[in-house]
């Protein structure tokens, strides 16, 4: 079984910064991709950023140049540094991890979600 623990959301003024983190644990053999999705009220869930095991990253056009995704050296924690935040970044942010377990093959796990609100 795989557990994800997210932290770092909150309320910030436009132009401010927040840093999200998500730690994966459990019966994990290897982790491939770690990333972040978000869902704003009345909208579908969308990819924000992802980091492959190689370190390569992928970003939504709306956050390029403002958000940076990274992983720790052990490759089990993913971070999302969010700068120059805008009101349209307001959403629930979900961590997403894809990999292989020791006993049950491939997995896709989601975090519980953390609220990010950008407002003056």
Image (cartoon, grey):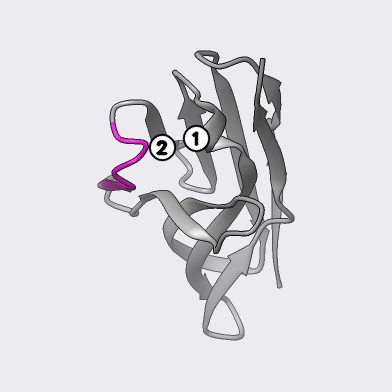
- Percent x, y of residue 69: 41, 37
| Chief SS of the magenta region | loop
**Residue 65 forms part of the magenta stretch:** no
- Percent x, y of residue 8: 68, 30
Do callouts 1 and 2 mark residues in contact (Cβ within 8 Å)? yes
The relative height of residue 116 versus residue 14 in the rendered view (above or below) is: below
Q: Secondary structure at mark 1?
A: strand
Residue displayed at 55% across by 16% down = 14
Crowdedness of circle 1 by 10 Å Cα count: few (<14), some, many (20+)?
many
Q: Which residues are magenta?
A: 57-64
Q: As rendered, which of 82 and 61 lies closer to the eye?
A: 61
Q: Identify the residue under disc 2.
A: 69
- Percent x, y of residue 61: 29, 44
The relative height of residue 44 versus residue 18 in the rendered view (above or below) is: below
Residue displayed at 62% across by 15% down = 13
The reply, left or right, for residue 113 in relation to residue 86 is: right
């Amino acid at each position: 079984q795989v557990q994800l623990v997210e932290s770092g959301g909150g309320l910030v003024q436009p132009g401010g910064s927040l840093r999200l983190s998500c730690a994966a644990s459990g019966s994990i053999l290897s982790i491939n991709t770690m990333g972040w999705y978000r869902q704003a009220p009345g909208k579908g869930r969308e990819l924000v950023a992802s980091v492959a095991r190689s370190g390569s990253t992928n970003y939504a056009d709306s956050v390029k140049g403002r958000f940076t995704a990274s992983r720790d050296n052990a490759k089990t924690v993913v971070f999302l540094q969010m700068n120059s935040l805008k009101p349209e970044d307001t959403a629930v942010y979900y961590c997403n991890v894809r990999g292989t377990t020791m006993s049950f093959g491939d997995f896709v796990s989601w975090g519980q979600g953390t609220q990010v609100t950008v407002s003056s």
